[in-house]
Each structure stands twice: as structure tokens, then as C-alpha cells.
Image: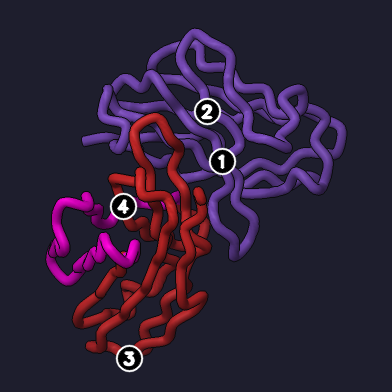
Chain colours: A purple, B red
Amino acid sequence: GAVVSQHPSRVICKSGTSVKIECRSLDFQATTMFWYRQFPKQSLMLMATSNEGSKATYEQGVEKDKFLINHASLTLSTLTVTSAHPEDSSFYICSAEKGQLYYEQYFGPGTRLTVT
Amino acid sequence: QQQVKQSPQSLIVQKGGISIINCAYENTAFDYFPWYQQFPGKGPALLIAIRPDVSEKKEGRFTISFNKSAKQFSLHIMDSQPGDSATYFCAAMTSGSRLTFGEGTQLTVNP
């Protein structure tokens, strides 16, 4: 199998605080992980690509200082939303690429972030 | 050129009917075309995928039809069930590129 988990599944935080979201590949090693955000009734928007042991590559328009990504091991990537504001409220989803097969991407269950 | 256009935006089908969702792409370098199913509050799950060297792939009630010359592909759900009610996304990619998603289709199957 290929299972990707995310923690937490839901988080509510106050404006100005930081929130960390974890993405883990449970039964495979992932050299590449991806972070997406999804607004209600919209498609997934890629935020950044994270490679183990190197800096993340951010998509145009995504603030790298606001969305800190760390991919410290082959099974764990973290997304930290710093100084969160209500407009950062969204559904954040990670995916992990299994091995060298670029087309084998497995998605996590998502994290609902609400900033009050 | 990286876009994938998906239609319709929403679809209502009666139980037992056929659901058809269409996608079109521009980038001829794309060589992998997956479909994802997403339930509310959940991450997308891979449903079925196809490569351009075949024109059709079937897995159970789900079939992908692929037309390389027209740069179009579609998902057919046979004998649609209420449990199939979800949002469906088509996508496309190639080696070294990111997954490019369609806009999504919200499918409702009435009992």
C-alpha cells in the first residue's frame, strides 16, 4: 500500500499565531512531497514542492517566509503557517511521490485550518 | 499550455445512469492522465489513470476514454450509485512536471 497521513486533521488558531502541519508517508519513502491548498468548491492549488534535505520550491505568488516547509526525512514534511491570518483559512493537502515513479503520487487526508 | 479544462462543473445523474465527465489539455508532452475522487473534507484519492498509448482503460464501473489526436479524455461511471456522489478531478502530468488539475466536477447521484 501507499498511505499518507496528515496531522492535525483540523486546527483552529488565533490570528497572529503559527501553526505546524505534518505530512507523513507511512509505508514508503518519499523523496518528494507536495503541498496544496484548496478553497471551498475549487481545485487544488500547488503551493510548493519539497525535496528531502533541500530547500522547497515555491510556486509563484506563494510567500516562502509565510509558509515554511521542511522535509527533514524521507517520510516527513512539515508546513508551518507563520503569523496566520483569517485569509489563510483553507484546506491544506499534502501528497508524496513514491520512489522514482513520478506518476505515483499519494495524497494525505488534508488539514482544515481555521484562523479566527 | 499547462491548463487542463474540465466540464461540466456539476452533474446530476439518477441511480443506475451513466456519468460522463470530460477534460481537454493543450500540452502534448503530458503522458499520464489520472482521475481523482474527493469526498467533502477528505483528500483526493486516485480512481483510475491512463497513458496515451491506449485509448481506453476500464476498472470495474469506471472507464477512461482517451483521444490523443483531439487531446481529450473522459471518465465514464457506469451504473452510477449514490455513493459515487463526490467531486471528481482530472489531471495530467509528465516526468519533471507537476500534476495539473482540472477545475473539478461535483457529481450528485440521486437515489
Give the foreground label among 4 and 3.
Answer: 4
Looking at the image, which residue is at 44% across and 82% down?
Answer: B11
Q: Element under label 4?
A: strand
Horizontal and vertical percent for residue A63?
Answer: 75, 30
- Please name the residue that numbered disc 4 is placed on: B33
Horizontal and vertical percent for residue A15?
Answer: 86, 38
Q: Which of the 4 image quadrants contains residue A26?
A: top left
Whether residue A95 is situated above or below residue A55 in the rendered picture: below
Q: CA distance from mark 1 to mark 4?
A: 17 Å
| Labels 3 and 1 in the same subunit | no
- The magenta stretch is B43-72
- Please name the residue that numbered disc 1 is placed on: A46
- Please name the residue that numbered disc 3 is placed on: B14
Residue A116 visible (yes or no): no
Q: Amino acid at mark 4?
A: Phe
Kindly check if marks 2 and 1 are in contact, taking CB atoms under 8 A apart as contact: yes
Give the foreground label among 1 and 4.
Answer: 4
Q: Element under label 3?
A: strand
Looking at the image, which residue is at 16% across and 51% down?
Answer: B53
Q: Residues within 10 Å of mark 2 (few under 14, many from 20)?
A: many
- Please name the residue that numbered disc 2 is placed on: A49
Q: Amino acid at mark 1?
A: Leu
Q: CA distance from mark 2 to mark 4?
A: 20 Å
* Mark identifier at residue B58: none
Q: CA distance from mark 2 to mark 1?
A: 8 Å
Q: CA distance from mark 2 to mark 3?
A: 40 Å
Kindly check if marks 2 and 4 are in contact, taking CB atoms under 8 A apart as contact: no
Whether residue B51 is situated above or below residue A71 in the rendered picture: below
Residue B109 visible (yes or no): yes
Q: Which of the 4 image quadrants contains residue B29?
A: top left
| Labels 4 and 3 in the same subunit | yes
Q: CA distance from mark 4 to mark 3?
A: 27 Å
